[in-house]
Amino acid sequence: MVKPTYLVKYISKKLGIPKSTVTLLKGHTNPHKKLEIEMEERDTKRLLGI
């Protein structure tokens, strides 16, 4: 699994989460990416406004 620095930095900054929680699963050379983001339930609820 590859972590392009620009994408990981952008996603982590926008979501306010550590870069280590963002992983690129598919699409390294494709414009369509599949990411995995590991978060605590409370953080997920905070981002969704629940």
Image: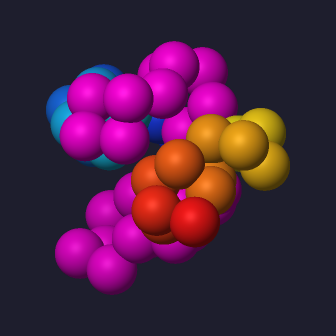
Q: Position of residue 14 (x, y in %)?
A: 25, 40
* Left or right of 27 in this view: 35: right
Q: Is residue 21 above or below residue 14?
A: above
User: In the image, which residues are magenta?
Assistant: 13-37
* Left or right of 41 in this view: 33: left
Q: Position of residue 17 (x, y in %)?
A: 48, 27
Coloring applied to the structure: rainbow
Q: Residue furthest bottom?
A: 32
Q: Is residue 44 above or below residue 34?
A: above
Question: Which residue is found at the position 63% from the left and 31% from the top?
Answer: 21
Answer with the quarter of the image where residue 6 lies: top left
Q: Is residue 46 above or below residue 33?
A: above
Question: Which residue is found at the position 62% from the left and 56% from the top?
Answer: 45
Q: Is residue 23 magenta?
A: yes
Question: Which residue is found at the position 51% from the left and 19% from the top?
Answer: 18
Question: Which image quadrant: the C terminus?
Answer: bottom right
